[in-house]
């Protein structure tokens, strides 16, 4: 009887730990995805404001922009008003 109680206690503790770890990982992934989506929308809006409607060619560079180091990504977005569409696309060919 004692062994069964110890096992049930261990099983419940293990379940709780698994649930806590799963929640923590889920929150982290959700936050990362939300941040990526927000950054993607920001880029889309900036490209639309600068070049008009977002065509497939411009849309294709969004993941490449997101992959840049933060400083480079920020500088590029800040300099969009001085970059032609062709120069921007050539940068990612």
Image (tube, grey):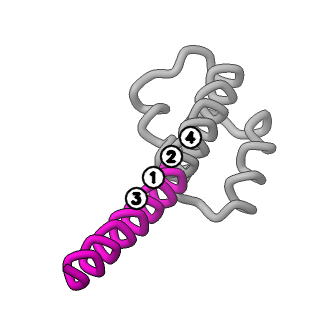
Q: CA distance from mark 2 to mark 1?
A: 6 Å
Q: Is residue 45 left or right of residue 62?
A: right
In the image, farthest residue toward the front: 1
Q: Nearer the viewer, mark 4 or mark 1?
A: 1
Measured from the top left, where is residue 18 in percent x and y? 37, 65
Q: CA distance from mark 4 to mark 1?
A: 12 Å
User: In the image, which residues are magenta?
Assistant: 1-29
Q: Along the polypeptide, which appears first: circle 3 or circle 1?
A: 3
The residue shown at (73%, 38%) is 80
Measured from the top left, where is residue 90 in percent x and y? 51, 48
Q: CA distance from mark 3 to mark 4?
A: 22 Å
Q: Nearer the viewer, mark 3 or mark 2?
A: 3
- Tell me the residue that label 3 is attached to: 19
The residue shown at (48%, 42%) is 61
Q: Along the polypeptide, which appears first: circle 3 or circle 4?
A: 3
Q: Nearer the viewer, mark 2 or mark 4?
A: 2
Residue 77 falls within the magenta-colored stretch: no
Q: CA distance from mark 2 to mark 4?
A: 6 Å
The residue shown at (54%, 37%) is 37
Dot 1, how many residues are within 10 Å of its Cα: few (below 14), some (14-19), or many (20+)?
few
Q: Is residue 69 visible?
A: yes
The residue shown at (19%, 79%) is 1
């Amino acid at each position: 009887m004692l062994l069964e109680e110890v096992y049930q206690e261990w099983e419940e503790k293990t379940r709780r730990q698994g649930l806590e770890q799963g929640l923590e990982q889920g929150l982290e992934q959700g936050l990362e995805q939300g941040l990526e989506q927000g950054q993607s929308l920001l880029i889309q809006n900036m490209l639309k404001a600068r070049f008009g409607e977002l065509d497939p060619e411009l849309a294709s560079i969004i993941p490449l922009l997101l992959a840049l180091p933060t400083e480079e990504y920020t500088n590029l977005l800040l300099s969009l008003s001085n970059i032609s569409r062709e120069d921007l696309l050539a940068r990612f060919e």
